[in-house]
């Protein structure tokens, strides 16, 4: 059985595959154009997969579920990097700050296991225009080692020199935390878990 993780993008055949009574108007309008949902950070109770639908606006998000057997394709954030997916968008879309920065950021992170999530990852995977001029660059990183706050600050400084706000969400098992929040913290930071978020002093050792 293929492992499905938070941030993965799942393609399904139709909106009828969603385990939901009804869809809001915005979802009805956009969903047929992408047929792609995002795996949420929530416990998976097979065969039901917790997913979310993304709308054009930030507030347009809907939590639903799909059955594993209805998943046609899994696209991971890491695949988008391995395939250099930013090379396959139109010339106009390559001008968006968050997409334009990716070749340089890929060079900085060449020794990292990293992926692209958020609106940019969604656009690269689905070829729908979900990123904007003002979009942040949401990246994820599965580390094989921990770094201290000074190292985190230095890395983020490198990533944020291309005219777009970039942050790394560090993935530790089923948990995740913001490298930016960690780099700026003096006490506790929030770690996202499969349940409620928790506050910890050392997110590398939970």
Image (tube, helix red, strand yellow):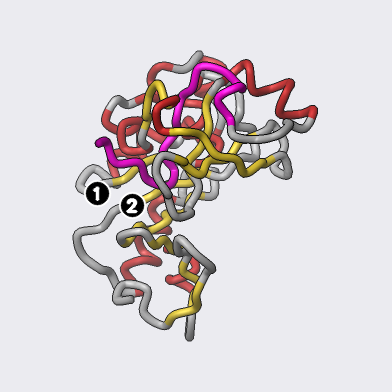
Alpha-carbon span between mark 2 and mark 1: 7 Å
Identify the element where label 2 is drawn: strand
User: Going 37% across and 45% down the picture, which residue do you hit?
Assistant: 5
Residue with the most extreme right position: 25
Span of residues in magenta: 1-18
Residue 178 visible in the current orientation: no
Which numbered circle lies on residue 112? 1
Examine the image and state in which quarter residue 63 appears: top right
- Give the vertical position of 62 relative to 130 (above or below): below
Q: In the rendered image, which residue does mark 2 sit on?
A: 141
Classify residue 189 as left or right of residue 26. left
The outermost residue toward the bottom is 187
Give the label on residue 150, or none: none
Q: Can the viewer see residue 198? A: yes
Q: Nearer the viewer, residue 37 or 105?
A: 37
Binning the other alpha carbons within 10 Å of mark 2 as few (below 14), some (14 to 19) or many (20 upward) gives many
Q: How many marks?
A: 2
Residue 115 place in picture, x, y as percent: 35, 41
**Residue 201 image offset from top left, x and y in percent:** 41, 83
Residue positioned 80% across, 28% down in the render: 25
């Amino acid at each position: 059985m293929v492992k499905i993780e938070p941030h993965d993008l799942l393609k399904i055949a139709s909106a009828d595959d969603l385990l939901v009574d009804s869809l809001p108007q915005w979802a009805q309008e956009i969903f047929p154009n992408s047929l792609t949902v995002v795996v949420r950070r929530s416990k998976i109770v097979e065969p039901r997969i917790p997913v979310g639908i993304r709308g054009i606006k930030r507030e347009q998000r809907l939590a639903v579920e799909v059955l594993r057997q209805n998943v046609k394709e899994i696209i991971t954030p890491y695949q988008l990097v391995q395939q250099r997916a930013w090379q396959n968008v139109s010339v106009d879309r390559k001008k968006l700050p968050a997409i334009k920065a990716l070749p340089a950021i890929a060079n900085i992170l060449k020794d990292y296991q990293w992926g692209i999530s958020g609106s940019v990852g969604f656009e690269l995977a689905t070829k729908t225009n979900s990123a904007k001029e003002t979009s942040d660059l949401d990246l994820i990183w599965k580390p094989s080692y921990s770094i201290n706050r000074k190292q985190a600050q230095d890395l983020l400084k490198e990533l944020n020199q291309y005219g777009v706000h970039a942050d790394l969400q560090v993935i530790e098992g089923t948990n995740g935390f913001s490298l930016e929040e960690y780099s700026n913290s003096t006490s506790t930071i929030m770690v996202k878990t499969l349940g409620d978020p928790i506050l910890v002093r050392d997110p590398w050792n939970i």
